[in-house]
Image (cartoon, grey):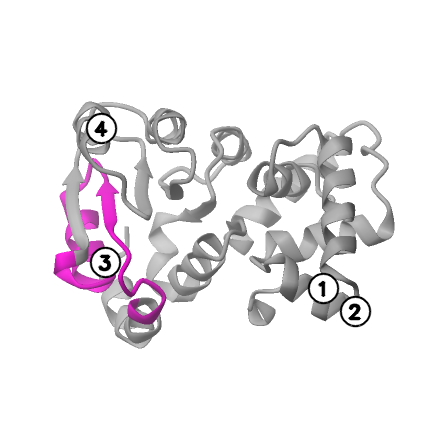
Amino acid sequence: MNSSGFLERSAQSRQEVMALLQSRSLMVASGRRLVISLLTGVVGDRCQWFGSATSEGEALELLSERQPHLLFVTHPLRPGSGLELVRRAKSLHPKLRCLLLLEEESPPQVRAALEARCDGICADRGVGFGHLVSATRAVLGGGFYMEPQLRDLLALARRASPDPAGPGLSARELEVLELVVRGYQNPQIAGRLHLSVETVRSHLKSAFQKLGASGRTQAAVKAVCQGLVSWHLDELP
């Protein structure tokens, strides 16, 4: 991680992140103590961090005792896997929101992160350059976030090896899903698209069925992974 860049930019986003995380409990799992120090020093108040861990086993032990609102995870852990930690953490606490910071920026790693049901994915070297605010806003708003560089990386790999035809989502279902990905809740989606909340629910139910998704987060992940939706960082709610 480029710590000098992180520190230079982090002050600019600290106040916004603090507002987003007010009254939320936080935890971080990273094999690098520098990352732990940077995150706990920049994100939230010290009293909001109930624990940190450097290994998968240590993190799971902490999670068995208490559930945070937001878990920051780096991959890999030392020892252990940040991806496996997210999978196991989600099984322990299904409502837990997880933001993953990847060391290796590659299509296989990004796809693995999606399959692990991460709610947000960033490259750890760029966290101090504005992505932390956007990622935190989307993830805590119930949406999904992927750093643009990682999204573009995945899109290039997808174009090189195209997937089969999509699941047949309607244009309106895609519009609704795109807003879900960006963190909008049903009343906000209804207002933006000039629909009733009940109609939004109906479109989501249909989209979930077509995607084989059990809920909003899984549908968002599948939509992003299949290249069905896109979003713009400057228009997040």
Mark 1 highlights which residue?
190
Q: Disc 2 versus disc 1: distance between alpha carbons? A: 6 Å
What residue sits right under mark 3 in the picture? 3
- In space, the residues marked 1 and 3 are separated at their CA atoms by 42 Å
Mark found first going from the N terminus, 1 or 3: 3
Q: Would you say the residues marked 1 and 4 are in contact, meaning their CB atoms lie under 8 Å apart?
A: no
Q: Quadrant of residue 107?
A: top right
Give the number of the mark in front: 3 or 4: 4
Mark pair 3, 4: CA separation: 31 Å
The answer to which of 120 and 160 lies nearer the viewer is 120
**Residue found at x 33% / y 48%:** 70
Q: First in sequence: mark 3 or mark 4? A: 3
Left/right placement of residue 116 relative to residue 4 reads right
Rendered location of residue 25, percent (x, y): 25, 52
Tell me the amino acid under the disc marked 1.
Ala
Marks 2 and 3, the one that precedes in the sequence: 3
Amino acid of disc 2: His
Residue that numbered label 4 is attached to: 64
The image quadrant where one finds the C terminus is bottom right
Q: Which residues are magenta?
A: 18-47
Q: Look at mark 2 in the image and give the residue it sits on.
A: 194
